[in-house]
Image (tube, helix red, strand yellow):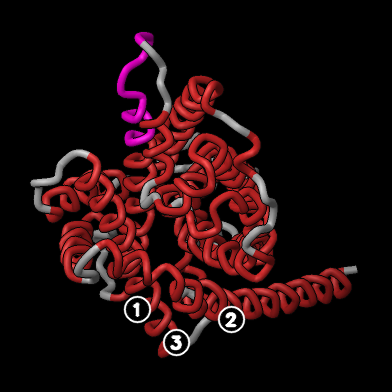
Amino acid sequence: MKKGEISARNVGCVIALASLATTLIAGFSGIAQDIWLAVPLSLLLGLPLMLMYARIAALNPGLGLYDIISMRTGPFWRKVFYLAFIWYALHVTALVTRNFAEFVVTISLERTPKVFVIMGIIAVAGYLSGENDNLLGRWAIIAVSVIMVNLFVTIALSIPAISFDNLKPVMEHGFNEIFSAAATMGAISYAETVLILISFDSLKQGDTPYKAYAVGALLGTGLLFVALTRNVLVLGREMTGVSLFPSYITARVINPGTFVEHIESLIAFNLIVLGITKAAVCLRVAAVGAAKLFKKKEGPPSLMVPACLVSTALSVTVFSNMFELVDFVEAYRFYVIPFTVVIPGVLWLKSEVAHRKNKKGTSRVTLVRR
């Protein structure tokens, strides 16, 4: 693999980590024991979007998100779409880092100002995203491996505390509530993967976007299903329903005895790694977009510091407390529609039209030569 290239497997791991990040820390405790039904339903809702994103990348081989926008839109809409994705990436970065800063401050650093935690997360994410896609891909492979091991360890240690009666009564919340939670989960986990299109200009030759999205969707959904179901099996519906960070609380409940102490540190490590990965993807999207918009030849690294500073400012000011952040989750599935459905839909249709025209032109040339 050439320097700077990224394989479909690595992209898939980035997709999996990005889809896990916010969803896993939030836990969607509102539907308690019915969460195991919402996870596969969210995948069904998100699957058409991921297929559309993969199709866009497949129709535009060797091009990243902004290159596709540049090729498929005129000068005016090109700038509009650039600005839209720059804002969306910065806003998602702010939401993710604020969410994880609240988590870190709540569990261990009560007296530490959130801004310092936010700056720490964004600094690491900025370093990862400021380099080439290959670095982020290698980070994702290692992170997924560590998270899977940690998840296996916590499940093994929680076996004495698991009760399958905690999954009853099934569908207590009704289909409408479960569907609503699945739609929100899909908007956070799968719709946001449109930002991963930024990495497909570096995709290894011979790999396909479909493989990357398939790996990401299956891996991310599998890990999410196991982690959230574990939480319910250990905590029960009442405790799950009132917990802000159910995954962390689950680890606190586990009693591993003298063999391992502070098992919750594994969960905290997993969540922080997820937050850094998602923030890194978003920062790269914002920096590359700004470089394209202002026609900077130096590329993303030259604009990474401003992107980090803007994201930090947004993260500190966008919400005044954790409860406002939680309330915004319900509205988020509508907020993302322009960025994850409308604009990608336009790019997909224009790419399909251009592909068919090229195909017809190639056929005519072949017939003339014959």
Residue ID at (38%, 9%): 259
State the separation of the CA atoms marked 1 and 2: 16 Å
Asked whether the residues under the numbered discs 3 and 2 touch, taking CB atoms below 8 Å apart as contact, a structural biologist would say: no
Identify the mark nearer the N-term, 1 or 3.
3
Q: Is residue 189 left or right of residue 52?
A: left
Residue ID at (60%, 77%): 345
Magenta region, residue range: 258-269
Quadrant housing residue 108? top left
Residue 166: horizontal and vertical position, in percent?
A: 60, 41
268 drawn magenta: yes
Q: Is residue 165 left or right of residue 149?
A: right
Q: Which residue is mark 1?
A: 83
Residue ID at (48%, 54%): 29
State the separation of the CA atoms marked 1 and 3: 10 Å
Image quadrant where one finds the C terminus: bottom right
State the separation of the CA atoms marked 3 and 2: 11 Å
Secondary structure, mark 3, is: helix
Q: Amino acid at mark 3?
A: Trp
